[in-house]
Amino acid sequence: MNPIERVRLGRTGVSVTRLGLGLAPLGGLFAPVDARQAADTVEHAWRLGIRYFDVAPLYGNGLAERRSGPVLAGKPRAEFALSTKVGRLLRSGGGDAQQIWAEPTELTPTFDFSAAGVRTSYAESLARLGLDRADILHLHDPDDHFAQAVAEALPALTELRARGLVGAVSAGMNQAGMLADLVRTGELDCVLLAGRFTLLDQSGAEELLPLCADRDVSVIAAGVFNSGLLADPRPGATFDYVPAGADLLARALAVRAVCDRHGVPLRAAAIQFPFTHPAVTCVLVGARSPEEVADAVRMAAVDIPAGLWKDLRAEGLIA
């Protein structure tokens, strides 16, 4: 795979590189990140040809946006695509604080899928980023707010698109079922599917991916390491942000054994597996250092023989 090939999202005018950089780690995911290191990470991704960057207010409660924005603001705006997310407002006190962020801030996220909340969230993200627009806006985790997301947030996003203030409307979730329901509204240009089309979880392929292929809705695959287990399967490694159980660890080790027989690093197979489905346009990989970015680009370019996927299927390790 050519990780820096540019591809268009659905029927929009927004193009992304096949490999995109997820900026959640720069918000202090699990461990603090020095501000200089965060900037160097984004800068190195740019030098290696990555031109799609994904962030959200949730990531470090604004830290990821504030750290990545100044670097991107210094780049030619027409040369890259940026996505951020709506559905949470950052406010002091209360809110839905998450323990996975290692750097405390005075702000916590509060769910808000109202039309006014969408507009406010977008404006506040742009202020933190120091940019005049995002190319893609994702509805972020509307799991418990589906009715309001469809009735209020989605029309607000489509209005922003109609006014030319954003190029593509999307939704990003860790589940496939509700994303499929959102695709059926006919309003989405793409979806961000996190952790549900990986070497350990192919549930996204049951309904969502065929639906997206049929409707020309691009799929951005994220969470391809399932938060760590597929990057380095070992006791204590995380799966979906919690320590993986013994069964999952054994399965990840079995996948790695097949990869080893083919001389392919597990990380390369994890990054490239989503592209085995034609609905997938782009893969997002999170990184917290220039070294991790460089590794992701190398892994995305590894030549993977078709026999690897065949053997994984034969052993019942992928569907």
Image (tube, rainbow, N blue to C red):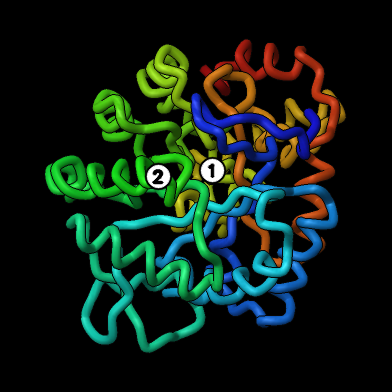
Q: Is residue 174 above or below residue 184?
A: below
Q: Which residue is mark 1?
A: 222
- Residue 239: x, y in percent? 49, 50
**Mark 1 Cα-neighbour bin, 10 Å: few <14, some 14–19, many ≥20:** many
- Residue 317: x, y in percent? 57, 23
Question: Amino acid type of disc 2?
Answer: Gly
Q: Earlier in the sequence, mark 2 or mark 1?
A: 2
User: With 162 as the anchor, is 184 left or right in this view?
Assistant: left
User: With 54 as the anchor, is 43 left or right in this view?
Assistant: right
Q: Is residue 1 above or below residue 144?
A: above
Q: Is residue 174 visible?
A: no
| Quadrant for the N terminus in the image | top right
Residue at (55%, 76%) from the top-left corner?
A: 66
Q: Nearer the viewer, residue 176 or 131?
A: 131
**Mark 2 Cα-neighbour bin, 10 Å: few <14, some 14–19, many ≥20:** many
Contact (CB < 8 A) between labels 2 and 1?
Answer: yes
Q: Mark 2 to mark 1: distance in Å?
A: 9 Å
Residue at (40%, 48%) from the top-left corner?
A: 138
2 vs 1, front mark? 2
Q: Which residue is mark 2?
A: 172
User: With 67 as the anchor, is 293 left or right in this view?
Assistant: right
Q: Secondary structure at mark 2?
A: strand
Q: Is residue 220 visible?
A: yes
